[in-house]
């Protein structure tokens, strides 16, 4: 029934979508609470709920608290009514999740992105993974609500095209009509949006929406991407933040040259490439490190090697990572002084190092407290980890089908 309601806007269709949205967001929920939120009459609400129950898209799930009389029935979405495919395409990996309607992950697959991850190879991985997941789960295509993609940008979201992401690990990523290609190969509808936005929506709706109204989400890996929720709503028009985040915010006007051409950007000190280069240069100058014992060629040291060294308390790597975190924290404090968020969620490979996260939180908090000492700000590394973007891409599909125009 959810697919059939898409872009239908008769009074009854809109009411059904409103009820489904509320049951999706707040279920298990009682009829009285639904009536209070929709302002429907009891008769109309009962009739529509009966339609939804008959269709099987919602189920009765036990009883709520009684306010005197009989305990009320509670209603919730039938998680198995449809399944969702959520995909995360980033510079580090491509991830494919099969989820039920309640975003429980049923199956997952990951492709590490490297020089061989051309558009052709990546799309082939996605296609074969989805076909395998459907076979293994004994699901027909008509049980899939759609494919949601959270991708690096820039994007033409409407037409489903990945335009020309910078610093991608393989060649060929220019004007890739991924929506059309996957729809033709799989005959399943595809929706695409900026990955940082889908990750933010997933984290916000899962854990934080009842506590915080203004949230900034920062993904920091090869690149830097930022999404914002202001007054409980995803901030529209943040496409450019979804591409570069605040990575090119200048934190030292006389600082080092950034790959963008400017000087003193956050990325010039704290991108994965910048940290890796700093460690390699320090070792070339003869600094002692556990890394020199574990690799034969200093030039071949990877960001993963550095993460391991930091976690083993290697002093040289730890000092460089702390320095990168210092500049990142300064950049974030500038952002705080403009937006005054209640919560900052950070994610991505760089933040997997505790010392980086702790230093960023300390510097950003200290710096922003100078101006507004009473402002209450929380930091989090999120709850969904690496799956956040793909889970949010699945959620995007539900929102798309249940929204009234
Ligand atoms: Zn820059």
Image (tube, grey):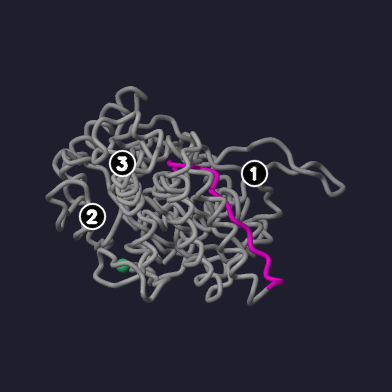
Residue 253 is situated, as x and y percent measured from the top left of the image, at 38, 76
Q: CA distance from mark 2 to mark 1?
A: 45 Å
Query: Which element carries disc 3, helix, strand or loop?
Result: strand
Residue that badge 1 annotates: 28
First reached walking from the N terminus: tag 3 or tag 1: 1
Is 258 or 100 nearer to us in this picture? 258
Q: Residues within 10 Å of mark 1 (few under 14, many from 20)?
A: many
Q: Is residue 374 magenta?
A: yes
- Badge nearest the viewer, 3 or 1: 3
Q: Is residue 129 above or below residue 29?
A: above
Q: Which residue is mark 2?
A: 167
What is the C-alpha distance between the residues marked 3 and 1? 36 Å
Q: Is residue 112 left or right of residue 24?
A: left
Residue drawn at 42 percent across, 39 percent down: 307
Specify the quadrant that holds the C terminus. bottom left
Numbered mark located on residue 93 in the image: 3
Instruction: Please state the extent of the stretch shown in magenta in the rendering.
Output: 373-387
Q: For this view, does 139 lie left or right of residue 383?
A: left
**Counting other residues with Cα less than 10 Å from the Cα at mark 3, is it few (<14), some (14-19), or many (20 or more)?**
some
Q: Position of residue 193 (x, y in %)?
A: 34, 57
In front: 385, or 123?
385
């Amino acid at each position: 029934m959810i697919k059939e309601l898409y872009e239908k806007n008769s009074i009854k269709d809109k009411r059904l979508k409103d009820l489904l949205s509320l049951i999706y967001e707040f279920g298990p929920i009682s009829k009285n609470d639904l009536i209070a939120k929709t302002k429907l009459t009891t008769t109309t609400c009962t009739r529509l709920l009966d339609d939804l129950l008959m269709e099987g898209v919602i189920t009765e799930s036990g009883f709520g608290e009684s306010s005197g009389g009989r305990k009320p029935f509670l209603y919730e979405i039938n998680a198995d009514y449809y399944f969702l495919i959520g995909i995360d395409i980033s510079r580090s990996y491509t991830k494919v999740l099969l989820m039920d309607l309640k975003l429980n992950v049923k199956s997952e697959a990951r492709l590490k992105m490297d020089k061989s991850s051309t558009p052709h190879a990546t799309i082939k991985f996605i296609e074969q993974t989805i076909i395998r997941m459907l076979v293994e789960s004994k699901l027909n295509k008509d049980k899939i609500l759609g494919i949601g993609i959270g991708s690096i940008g820039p994007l033409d979201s409407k037409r489903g095209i990945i335009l020309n992401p910078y610093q991608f690990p393989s060649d060929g990523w220019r004007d890739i009509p991924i929506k059309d290609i996957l729809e033709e190969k799989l005959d399943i509808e595809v929706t695409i949006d900026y990955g940082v936005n889908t990750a933010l929506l997933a984290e916000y709706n899962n854990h934080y929406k009842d506590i915080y109204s203004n949230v900034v989400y920062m993904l920091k890996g090869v690149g830097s991407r930022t999404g914002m929720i202001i007054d409980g709503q995803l901030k529209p028009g943040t496409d450019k933040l979804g591409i570069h985040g605040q990575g090119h915010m200048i934190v030292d006007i006389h600082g080092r040259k950034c790959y963008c051409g400017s000087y003193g950007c956050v990325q010039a000190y704290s991108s994965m490439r910048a940290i890796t280069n700093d460690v390699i240069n320090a070792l070339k100058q003869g600094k002692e490190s556990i890394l020199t014992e574990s690799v034969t060629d200093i030039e071949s040291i990877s960001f993963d090697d550095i993460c391991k060294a930091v976690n083993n308390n290697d002093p040289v790597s730890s000092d460089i990572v702390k320095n990168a975190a210092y500049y990142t924290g300064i950049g974030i404090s500038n952002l705080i002084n403009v937006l005054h968020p209640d919560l900052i969620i950070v994610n991505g490979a760089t933040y997997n190092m505790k010392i980086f996260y702790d230093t960023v939180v300390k510097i950003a908090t200290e710096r922003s407290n100078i101006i507004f000492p009473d402002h209450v700000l929380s930091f989090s590394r999120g709850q969904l980890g690496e799956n956040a973007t793909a889970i949010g891409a699945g959620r995007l599909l539900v929102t798309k089908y249940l929204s009234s125009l």
